[in-house]
Structures are given as C-alpha cells and as structure tokens.
Amino acid sequence: MKFNRNIKSLIQRLAVLYYVNTILKTVQSVNVQKTNCDYLKSIYKELDISTNWNDNTNDCCKLKGIQCNPDFNIIRIDLSKSKIKGKLSENIGFLTNLQFIKLDNNEIYGNIPQNIGELVNLEELILNKNNLSGTIPKTLGSLKKLKELNLGDNGLYDYIPDALGSLSSINKLYLENNLLEGSIPTSLSYLNNLEHM
C-alpha cells in the first residue's frame, strides 16, 4: 500500500512539473514572438514600409513576405520587388534565426549593417538591384551556412573583403555592377562549393 501511495504521489508531482514546464514554454514563446516583432517593426520603420500593425504579437508572422518557425522566430524575410525606399536597420542583426533575406529589386540605400554577420543561420542574402553604398562588411565572412550572396547592381565600393573566403558553404556569389576596386582575393579560390560568380 505504501509503495502505491509513493508512486501515486510521484505521478502527481510529475504531472505538476509537466504543467509548469508547459506554461513556462508558452510564456517564453510569447516573449520571443514579441521581441522578434519589435525588431521587425523597427526594420519596417527604417525601410519606410507601412503596415496596419497592431500590438497583437501574432501579427508579424502573418505579414506578407514574413515566415516564422513553430516557435515564432522569424526565419524568412522576402520583400523582393516591393517598391521599398529606405535603409536597412541594424536591428536585422538581432533576428538570429533568419535563414533567408530577399530584399532585391527595391530602392534600399545606405550601408549594409555590420551586425548582419551575427545571422549565423543565414543561407541566402539577396540584396541586389538596390541603391546600397559603403563597403562590403567583413563580418559576412562569419556566415558559414550562407549558400547564396547577391550584392550585385548597387553602389558598393572599395574592395572585396578577404573574409568572404571563409564562406565555406557558398555556391553563388554575385558582386557585379558595383564600384569595387582591386583584384579578386585569392581566398575565394578555396571556396570548393562555389559554382557561380
């Protein structure tokens, strides 16, 4: 009898722990969702994108061109050919679960944020056919999962950073029609997966 009571008590405690854990995960998910939406709001503001945004934290995952994973982390921003005129916010570097950024064929101007190198899960960065200026950030070399980098048809200047030779997964690299100087770094010749340049 005593053994049965101990098992019953243990099962009740485990059920309570499971319930508490479920509540904590839900709260954490809501916090992640709100934080991601706050960052996305600031990115939209600097890109001068208007939305009918309210304070409902689910809204950012339902916006056109935005895709979230089941944990409400933003994993894709695809606003190609959206007539965007604005700057790319530093806050993009805080969306660390991003896998795809496609903002090509717009009128985005200014520099590519340095902290874009924090997006270690990024597989595609497509920013071609905009009005970007400044240098290509060396921090892009940190993006080990990056398979496609397209910065073509902008106003980027200076040189191609040697750090791009660290993009071990890259198979498409487009930098044409910019104001780049100097020669192609020898480090790019070691990119075994590179098929298009």
Image: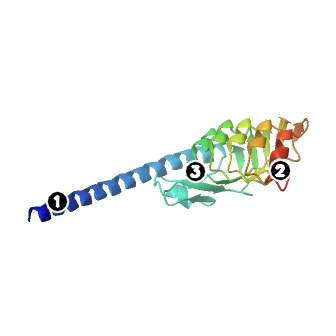
- Mark 2 vs 1, N-terminal side: 1
Mark 3, secondary structure of its residue? loop
Q: Residue at x 73, y 48 (%)?
A: 168
Question: Are discs 2 and 1 less than 8 Å apart at CB?
Answer: no
In three-dimensional space, the C-alpha distance between marks 3 and 1, rounded to whole angstroms, equals 41 Å
- Mark 1: amino acid: Ser
Residue 89 showing in the rendered view: no
Disc 2 secondary structure class: strand
The image shows residue 22 at horizontal and vertical percentages of 34, 57
Residue 32 badge? none
Q: Is residue 148 above or below residue 1?
A: above
Residue tagged by mark 2? 174
Label 2 Cα crowd, 10 Å radius (few <14 / some 14-19 / many 20+):
some
- Image point 59% across, 59% down: which residue? 67
Q: Which residue is mark 1?
A: 9
Q: Judge by depth and name the residue closer to the eye, 99 or 178.
A: 99
Whether residue 11 sits left or right of residue 163 in the image: it is: left
- Kindly identify the amino acid type of the residue bearing the numbered disc 3: Asn
Across and down, in percent, residue 23 comes to: 33, 55
Here the colouring is rainbow
Q: Secondary structure at mark 1?
A: helix
In the image, residue 148 above or below residue 142: below
**Residue 60 falls left or right of residue 151:** left
Residue 118: x, y in percent? 62, 41
The amino acid type of the residue labelled 2 equals Tyr
- Gap in angstroms between the C-alphas marked 2 and 3: 24 Å
Using the rendered image of the protein, determine whether residue 186 is visible from the camera's viewpoint: yes
Disc 3 versus disc 1: nearer the observer:
1
- Residue 61 quadrant: bottom right
What residue is drawn where x is 68% and y is 47%?
144
Marked residue nearer the N-terminal end (3 or 1)? 1
